[in-house]
Each structure stands twice: as C-alpha cells, then as structure tokens.
Amino acid sequence: MSNDSAGYRVLATSADNRQAAAVLAAGAHRTLAIFTRDMERVIYDTVEFVAAVRQLALRSRFSRIRIAVIDPLPAIKDGHRLIELGRRLSSFIEFRRPAAEAATLADAFLIADENGLLYRSLAGRYEGYMDTDNPHAARIYLRAFEAIWELAEPEPEFRRLSP
C-alpha cells in the first residue's frame, strides 16, 4: 500500500485490500456496511478480518454489521468464515442479496462508522483506495449502500446452520 496522507492509502493488490479491510474493521466502533459481489474470500475470509468483525459485534448491543452480497452461494457452500460468524451472531450481523439492479454495479466497498472507506471501482480488480478518515466520501457510499439495502432480500441460506 502506498501512503499518500495519514489515513489515505492507494490499494493495488489483494494483500493491500486484505490489510485495509482488517484495519477498517478493527477501527470501527459501531457499524460496518459491505457491498460485495461474492464475499471475496481473499479479503473477507481471513482470520484477522473475521476477528475484527467479531470484536465489533460483541463490543456493544448497538453494533450493526450489514453485508450486501450479489452472489452469496459459492461463499455459503465453501464455508466462508464471515458467514459462519454471522450465523452465530445473527443479532449483529445481517446478510442480504441485493435486487437485480444492484447486480449491474461494478464497484465494491466497505464503510466503517460513516467515516472510513475501502473502495474499488471494479469489484473484480484490486486497485482502489482506503481512507480511515473521510466522512464525506463514506457518507456518499453509505447512502448508496442504504438504497441497495432497502431493496435487498434476506438470503435464507445465510440462516442455515450447515451449508
């Protein structure tokens, strides 16, 4: 990751994205919102990321982790760690499948506490950026996430105890 300012980092590799997601999740105090195509195993199925999400979920009864996943079935079948955590902590972690219109979106992002943002304009690539302190950009993407979330449907497969 290249460091252009205190909280802003350019991302170029899967390792950059993995580290950025873990940093943002570990720094979150109350909320995470994730928009992803397929639960990106290389980013969101790591011990560090899942531990940070677990800690966030258990930090407060007001913690809320929302994940909108366009194609969740491969991750469900493969036993993704974040899905397993969500099944155990379903009061804090919620998964939904976005409506068909959202499937045409090319980007992927994670928003932490209306302040931090990991953003990639092309979900299938690792080029993007992370900013730990950009409430303006985070709120823009959070509004987009809210619109996606409102039209999304709960995915019944996320609730099953065994895939």
Image: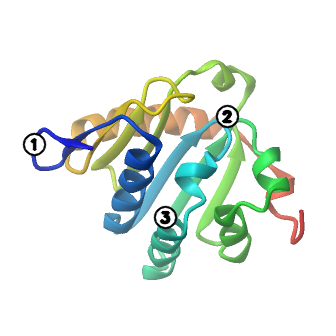
| Nearer mark to the viewer, of 3 and 2 | 3
Label 2 near label 1: C-beta < 8 Å? no
Residue 65 position within the rendered picture, expressed as x and y whole percent measured from the top left:
53, 60
The residue located at (27%, 50%) in the rendering is 115
Q: Residues within 10 Å of mark 1 (few under 14, many from 20)?
A: few
Disc number placed over residue 55 in the picture, else none: none
At mark 2, the secondary structure is helix
Question: Which amino acid lies under the numbered mark 2 shown in the image of this protein?
Answer: Leu
Q: CA distance from mark 3 to mark 2?
A: 27 Å
Q: Is residue 90 visible?
A: no
In the rendered image, which residue does mark 3 sit on? 49
- Determine whether the residue tagged by mark 1 lies in a helix, strand or loop: loop
Sequence-earlier tag: 3 or 1:
1
Compared to residue 63, the image places residue 136 above or below, namely above
What SS does tag 3 mark?
A: helix
- Residue 135 lies, in percent from the top left, at 23, 44
Colour scheme shown:
rainbow
Q: Circle 1 sits on which residue? A: 5
